[in-house]
Image (tube, coloured by chain):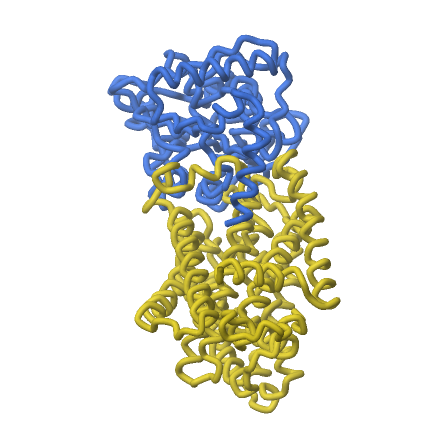
Amino acid sequence: MMSLGAVAGLSLGSLACTKAGMEEFLQKHFREMTEDEKKQVIRRLEERYLKKYGKKVLISTQPAETGVLWGYGLDLSRCIGCRRCVYACVKENNQSRVHPQLQWIRVIRLKKGSLINLENAEHYYNPETVPEPGFMYMPVQCQQCENPPCVRVCPVKATWKEPDGIVVVDYNWCIGCRYCMAACPYKGRVFNWAEPNLPAAEVNTEVHYLGNRPRMKNVVEKCTFCVQRVRQGRYPACVEICPTGTRKFGNLLDPNSEIRYLIENKRVFRLKEDFNTDPKFYYFFSA
Amino acid sequence: MEAWRFFRQTVKMVFIGTKVYYLWCAFLLTIIGVAIAFYVKQLDAGLIVTHMRDQVSWGLYIGNFTYLVGVAAAAVLLVIPAYIYHFDPIKEIVVLGELLAASAIIMALMFVLADLGRPDRFWHLIPFIGSLSFPKSLLAWDVIVLNGYLVLNTLVPIYILVKIYFGAEPNKKFVIPLVLLSIPWAVGIHTVTAFLYNGLAARPFWNASILAPRFLASAFCSGPAMAIIIFQILRKTAGMKIKNEALFKISELIAYAMFINLFLLGAELFKEYYTGTIHLAPMEYLYQGLHGHNSLVPWIWSALLMNVTAFFIFLIPKTRENLLTLNIGSLFIIVGVWIEKGLGLIVPGFIPDPLGEIYEYMPNITEISISLGIWAFGLLIFTFFMRIAIPIQRGDFIHSRYTKPTARPQYERIEP
């Protein structure tokens, strides 16, 4: 306990040198902040980002709309494994580019004939052109489970499911224990093992507090279906960039949405359904 | 003021000693110093200075944590055979067991802290002040039971020691219920720690019902094995009175525990290998290597060899009752269980990862140094505990009214 105190003291000491540092140290859980407190935090963060990146970053805290539950469709017969989605996501969501390189989407390459056993999945492949004969590609990202194991295990409630079904992280509340990463069956979470390496020129300034705002070292992060976009009526970046129309997105509660059409008319399945995580990410084969 | 004298004398006992004592402390402090340097670097640069990555997101720190929770649990469970078999210095065994448990818990908590990305946000874990997710998160359970156990295991020995110092009998009505409470609590901390891993469906290697029983069985091996070594050191250096018969009895108990541990391992191996589903992969990685990746294979086979050898050493009366073979067996178990429950438990949980990727993890110099530093810190704390507890128990360090002012305090002869 002495050591715990000492370390807490040490980190407190280094942080508390500035007023902003002290405020950050004492900052409350996002869901427990009043509107005023949120505004204060946003102001402080925007100042910090301005100093760090020389850019005015606009941080939204736009809440979920009622009557919306986001769902995702992915057409495995169309995906060609080009991984444009991976890089569009990185750009949109301000991930660390190198050391560590963080990506929220992983497109695995599977030999045709095997889909469920991922043990033979290939993660690192670099052909001249895609698609390659004999292979299929399966993009995997956070499946936005209705019953998310990552949320259940978090010891400090730093991650939760929003009313529109998106699982988010309060980067300022995460203690970096990585229990959520151990709990996720989809590898949906990545960790900022070091201070994120985000070139100032590449900062996306349209951000959401619970989504793509620049992160700090030693906290976890994950796909949020581009919460900053979808709550403003736009598609997630990966849907927009996909050259083959593999990716579909919509409101599961809207009977006329494309995603509902897919679920009703295509033969969809969800990854690792046997885990009862109830993902809102539907894979299907249109052909 | 007697309290002031007590305090002054304890400080003196900790700071004044023989050359060997100073050397021992200097040795530990050096290791701690190196660890602090590495930890400062880790705090500054982030956990990237370790070999942990997204694929294997826990490593040496959490392995040590798991092992030490077992040691802490077993140290207190030693009280049961001490009662049943009427080991001679029963009060000493209670105090020693609980102080060993306290030291192990302190180390375990420090390992969690070393692993924590944001120790500055440690307060988020404090109930009512932060937002501890109890009862949903097993880690929240662990925070509560481990800290409770730490309080329990410092409270009881301190109470007993202070009472003895004042020349009074400890109040049994107060001590016995607490000691009795610490026994199921010991089982509890290790069960909760097992459930921490056990509850993750994403990790088939841990998601086996056998995990908690195996944790307890192996803890019953490593904890008492450590006690056997410590008892002998204290007997030599601090004049602690413990008979060989007690050590032999403990080693016999270790043989039973090791039998259960090996049996449970066999049950697990049978199920995984005979059914041979895709969930066999982590086990295969550990024991045979998977797709050419096999860095844990030599480790786990050494562990198995050490555990089986120790089992026979402790099973056969002749080798069990020979101090040389007894100590070899104890060391084998300490190391064997450490491998089995440290890297051998944590790392295969992550290999292959949920999407089939294999990232081979081996701790680097940063992780090893910080881990050694935490072990050294725990040993130092335990040394200090013993430095004070043993003279009190032997009646050398006692209330001033029982000592002649001219009498030279005996503790100055004491070595660690």
The hue used for chain A is blue
Q: Position of residue A249 (x, y in %)?
A: 38, 21
Quadrant including the C terminus of chain B: bottom right
Judge whether B321 appears above or below A69 on screen.
below
Residue positioned 53% across, 76% down in the render? B395
Of residues B51 and A233, the one drawn nearer to the viewer in this rendering: B51
Judge whether B389 appears above or below A225 on screen.
below
Chain letter of the yellow region: B
Q: Position of residue A224 (x, y in %)?
A: 43, 25
Q: Residue furthest top?
A: A56
- On the picture, is A261 further left or further right than B5? left
Judge whether B253 appears above or below A15 on screen.
below
Of residues A25 and A181, the one drawn nearer to the viewer in this rendering: A25
Residue positioned 37% across, 41% down in the render? B132
**Residue B160 location, quadrant:** bottom left
- On the picture, is B149 further left or further right than A114? left
Residue positioned 44% across, 44% down in the render? A183
